[in-house]
């Protein structure tokens, strides 16, 4: 992944791609500041890879001055906009992207995004010879090789702030809520939120076998009934999106039909994605932006900057997206211990 | 409504009823502090009217000491719990409630809640001769005769904080969101949130005729298309719950099917109900709690304490619940002016 | 104040002046949207009145497009910047301002600010014949004739959020804190924050006679001692800035020296001034911006837009700044009642 | 540190000591849940070590039921109260503590606190033979051997939320602010907040030699002047408490006197200590509470539970407090790089 014969980098293309994540702007700022420090120009392309392949958006590309990134560290969303770009799955799109990069005399491409965005980078490699680097920006925290992705910490915190509010009503009515959380196909958000909001149940891919859905329903119903018999209080189930067919609403319906248990479903949805990044994500994004520019200068390519044990590293992009990063066994155990403990509580 | 021959009040029963609202605890604290000041004891009954009619909950009733209400002014929910109580719609329930109050030598009953709770009070009047007073605690702000109800200001603010986050993603993707807000059958929350989050569309009972649903859909589709043609940007529609059959999800489906417009539905749901009350609700609740106790001492009964033009008043309970309080024409006009203005915007 | 023979307005100058207040950006947006609706151009001048009198800043003035004010409703601060401008107290400055306005063919000047800013407007009247209107934007809420000024509600809420945090430590250590709040020479913030955070003491201009400082100190010390004897708990004193010579730190020192009472002083300072405006301020600013433009079209001048009992009005600028608006007697009484109540609490 | 011959633990004493930190309640909850799971009783002692040595507080000790710790995970402060306890520095106090523990047939003592609290534990070892374990709860993050202490993440986040607000005013006026942050004698909070709020200057023990104060002042003045000449914008200096003699206020005075630079000092103070813990601190506290109980069962003593690379460990108490944990060089470098970059910015 080292490009030993690399000529000095003069121009970087920068874009954000895939679902937006809090801290993307902090990462943009950091890349621009670091690049300027090394006398490298940064061209911002808009709307993800569309900025490289759609006529309309190519025209929007602009040199990112220091003033442009001043005062954005605390903004959610992304000033470079984002988008999905189906064209990047086709040869036609990849060739167009390569042409745009060459037409703009770009030496290196920096993409802030998740696994889909990084697949795009790897595919582009066949058509474009410049350096390429990924910065992990996704609330899902599912990229392998980095302890944290930009946006994850904020999404977890937004989740608990919402559930703290739901708990007020749940307590007042001693009611059962099923709260559905984002995370696509990984339980990082669900487990962390579940522990931090003292959820009575955490249902996620890691502790749930899809083939045992009906068993699970009976088990869940039994646990709820036992808990509610033991004590008067609220009961909050957090559940990962895409886990239960039909989601939280359908699970609530089935608990009602099959076990006469009344639950209120709540889908947090897109409020988890936006908002001002918490300190952790701002600092992570700042460190990663600097690390990305320094990695480019060192000649690295097709790598993702990563945080491991609080230090910056570079790992191959292919490795980062080969497997989804799993929720740590320690965390799952901690949650299950605490769950076992709370389940037996007699208040 | 004055009870001229009133004997001195020695004991008040206090309960919270109906949907919980941020500030209910501040009101509980205020009633208890004011009552103690006048050497009146406050008995807290739990779980709304159930506390008066269900054996189990009657046993939970307790004298509320000052220490019990210390440090609760900033808590959402209600320490007295809440509930719906179908039994209070029957003669049997009303008689039981009256018996419980008499058995506890209660001189006056204070209920913090909304219109359903106050109907209960009025019905109880036939069976119980003590003084009765209502404190308007509901996020819906639909009680006639008071400028504000406890919890409304916080619910509006929680709504805009959530939509500020959604706006980040909507901006990043230049996407259309339909955000469904609470409010039961009134648009107070919807209009206020709509203006405060700069929503491009506000759909509520006040500006929407249910008979013209299909017309409205066409109109809405045309407006969205026009706005999206004029400029690249996000578009947020806020909609009152119970307005569109099937809610935000169904409206999104219809816009997709009939006009090929893609929208993301978002239902804020119960996060609007909880949370720490903002200053306005804490102050309102504090003033109302004191006013309620003073009104009782003055011999008033079957009234609701109300804020009008920043001052405390008492109005007949029957009047407060006869009609839903309408959203002021001024506010609707302001929203429509701003809407007209933003609609023509060419960014 | 009506300018009957007013020629149609084509160009408005807009500036923000004095201390910044949350919601100023929402007001800027609203003025620009409303003006565009009526085909009026808005020229934004930067850095308060300096934008009219300093060569450097005059050059920064620009026509405010709709896109410029898109997405700013929720930002604290002011995109037009602010400043104090001593030159506007001199004839020379006033003449320069008039020249700038004429050179830009400005028909009307809209200033968002407080009493100092409005004095500037009145002084300018002698030198410039265009229409002039003030929008009350100040956290102090001290302008007479309007129930609320833009920024006040947010500043109060920021105050209670800070004190809620301080209360955690105060409770943990059963300690006494003296928290100093902004408000210049008025107690609006202090009283509202005091009630909303359940402060054990509120010290402000309205309940404090400067001549009786030493008496007050003895009295305060006696009250604290009594309260601490009665119960184990925290004790929070909120105090208005500029009230006690030397402020919270000096008061703490004196309580220690003269009464052996240990207090921790805390000065909230400038965190009260910034931050995203809460819904109330965004709505108020939106209504006031529209009302200001409409008032100009109706030919009004040297007035301030004002909210009274939830409706928009215009009142003479001279009246608005003649006297500081007092804290309502009702609010002071409410606080003192509650104080009296809590003081006797025996927890 | 293993107590091989340990008899089964039946009773744990739990207390919180030293400055309160957000997440202490989450840790209390976790210890109680885990202990109950293993059929161990937890006796809560109040007011730190005073709970063991003062007659009055010993009487307050109580068995902590599951219901007592229900619904406290999100509260700031500590339900067990905290305090400094000078008596624990004397033999008399240590003997009293040992007597209290024995009188209550306590098998193990768990203390949630910082280095001072852990010194107390080590001193107690000479007088009491039970097992002892420390849980690192301090916003300062200065305990060696653990990546994070409970409360640190929240304190950093509270700091940036405050400075985000200050930034609004600083931007509006293009003004210089000096914001003083907590951290006692370590720069963990200062560096993290500095990076996350994009501070133009970070002054802390790690990059500041006390002997070079006057040099530093000249240097700082030069940097500010250069930055302000390059561009119109705000300038925020974050400074660690106890670094500059006289603090932020004195530094502001000196910059004014010696370099004619006007700065506004701001001391965040105790708002950094309270507030609801963010997710990170709740999860850390939950894991540490469980780990502490499990360590006791395994016979460990005089250790501190610690998080290293996201996993739980136990390290000797003596090691944890021997040296203050340093701010990582990586973080200091990151901050200095970014600083160097922003310093040369010409906006």
Image (cartoon, coloured by chain):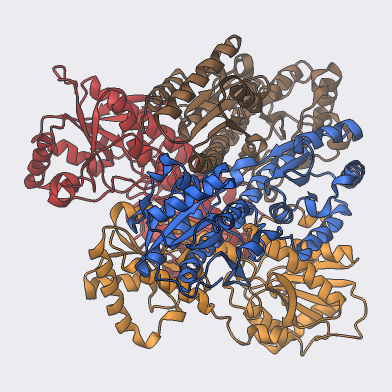
Chain colours: A orange, B red, C brown, D blue
Q: Can residue B232 be seen in this snapshot?
A: no
Which quadrant of the figure contains the N terminus of chain D? bottom right
Quarter where residue C41 is shown: top right
In the rendered image of this protein, does residue D141 appear above or below residue C139?
Answer: below
Left/right of residue C176 with respect to residue A52 in the rendered view: left
Out of D131 and A336, give the one closest to the viewer.
D131
Left/right of residue A298 with respect to residue D325 in the rendered view: right
Q: Residue furthest top?
A: C211
Quarter where residue A312 is shown: bottom right
Out of B19 and A68, give the one closest to the viewer.
B19
Identify the residue shown where x is 58% and y is 71%.
D313
In the rendered image of this protein, does residue D302 appear above or below residue C288?
Answer: below
Q: Can residue B207 be seen in this snapshot?
A: yes
Q: Residue D133's spot in the image, x, y percent?
A: 52, 62
Identify the residue shown where x is 88% and y is 47%.
D227
In the rendered image of this protein, does residue A344 appear above or below residue A65?
Answer: below
Left/right of residue A37 with respect to residue C281 in the rendered view: right
Left/right of residue D111 with respect to residue A276 in the rendered view: left
Q: Residue A173's spot in the image, x, y percent?
A: 29, 54
């Amino acid at each position: 992944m080292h490009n030993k014969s690399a000529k000095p980098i003069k121009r970087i293309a920068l874009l954000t791609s895939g679902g937006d994540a809090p801290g993307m702007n902090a990462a943009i700022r950091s890349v621009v500041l670091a690049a300027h420090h090394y006398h490298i120009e940064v061209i911002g392309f808009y709307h993800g890879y569309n900025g490289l392949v759609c006529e309309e958006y190519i025209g929007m590309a602009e040199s990112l001055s220091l003033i442009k990134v001043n005062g954005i560290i605390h903004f959610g969303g992304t000033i470079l906009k984002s988008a999905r770009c189906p064209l990047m799955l086709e040869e036609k799109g990849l060739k167009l992207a390569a042409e745009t990069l060459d037409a703009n005399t770009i030496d290196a491409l920096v993409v802030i995004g998740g696994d889909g965005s990084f697949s795009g980078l790897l595919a582009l490699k066949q058509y474009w010879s410049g350096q390429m680097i990924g910065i992990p920006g996704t609330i899902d925290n599912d990229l392998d090789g980095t302890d944290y992705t930009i946006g994850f910490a904020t999404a977890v915190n937004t989740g608990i702030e919402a559930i703290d509010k739901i708990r007020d009503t749940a307590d007042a009515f001693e009611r059962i809520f099923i709260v559905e959380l984002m995370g696509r196909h990984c339980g990082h958000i669900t487990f962390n939120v579940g522990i931090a909001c003292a959820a009575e149940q955490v249902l996620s891919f890691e502790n749930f076998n899809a083939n045992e859905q009906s068993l699970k329903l009976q088990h869940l119903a039994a646990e709820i009934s036992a808990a509610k018999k033991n004590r008067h209080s609220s009961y909050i189930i957090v559940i990962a999106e895409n886990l239960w067919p039909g989601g939280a609403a359908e699970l609530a319906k089935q608990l009602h039909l099959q076990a006469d248990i009344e639950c209120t479903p709540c889908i947090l949805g897109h409020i988890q994605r936006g908002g001002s990044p918490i300190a952790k994500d701002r600092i992570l994004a700042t460190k990663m932006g600097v690390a990305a520019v320094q990695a480019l200068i060192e000649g690295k390519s097709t790598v993702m900057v990563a945080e491991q044990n609080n230090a910056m590293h570079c790992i191959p992009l292919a490795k980062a997206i080969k497997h989804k990063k799993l929720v740590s066994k320690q965390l799952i155990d901690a949650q299950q211990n605490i769950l076992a403990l709370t389940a037996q509580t007699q208040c």
